[in-house]
Image (tube, rainbow, N blue to C red):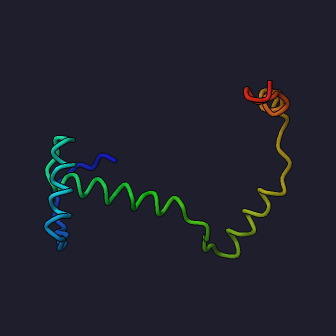
Amino acid sequence: MIQTGTRKAPINIRALDTQRSLIDRAAAIQNKTRSEFMLDAACREAENTLLDQRLFFVSEKEFGEFEKALGTPLADNEPVRRLLASKAPWEK
């Protein structure tokens, strides 16, 4: 995730000395500052959390469109049909 622009929003956090030391050692291995390392790690975890959502809230109209899409038969797709009909490499 590459972001451009000036960083304006401060994020403050308190940690144990051992935690800060651990983070500093890991940041040094990646040639990053503590802030860069922590922000990258936090953003990566935030993205994973958001991508792992299993509950979505939608309007009735959006849900209707979703159900319609689920019920619409797919057009014939020969490459996909061949792929699904083939054995997996570990089954051969």
Q: Quadrant of residue 28?
A: top left
Q: Give me the residue at 20% from left, 56% from top.
A: 23
* Relative depth, front residue between 11 and 4: 11
State the residue lying farthest toward the top. 92
Residue in the image at 34% along x and 47% along y: 1
Report the number of numbered marks.
0
Question: Is 9 on the left or on the right of 58, as rendered?
Answer: left
- Where the C terminus falls, by quadrant? top right
Residue 12 picture location, percent across and down: 17, 72
Q: In this view, does 10 lie to the left or right of 75?
A: left
> Looking at the image, which residue is at 30% across and 46% down?
2
61 is higher (above) or lower (below) than 74: below
Q: Is residue 59 left or right of residue 73?
A: left
Above or below, 44 against 50 in this view is above
Across and down, in percent, residue 39 comes to 25, 57
Q: In which quarter of the image is residue 6?
A: bottom left
Foreground residue, 51 or 61? 51
Quadrant of residue 45 within the rendered picture = bottom left
Viewer-closest of 70 and 54: 54
Residue plotted at (65% across, 75% down) = 59
Residue 79: % across, % down = 78, 27
- Left or right: 17 with respect to 70? left
Q: Position of residue 77 (x, y in %)?
A: 81, 32
**Vertical placement of residue 31 versus 54, above or below:** above
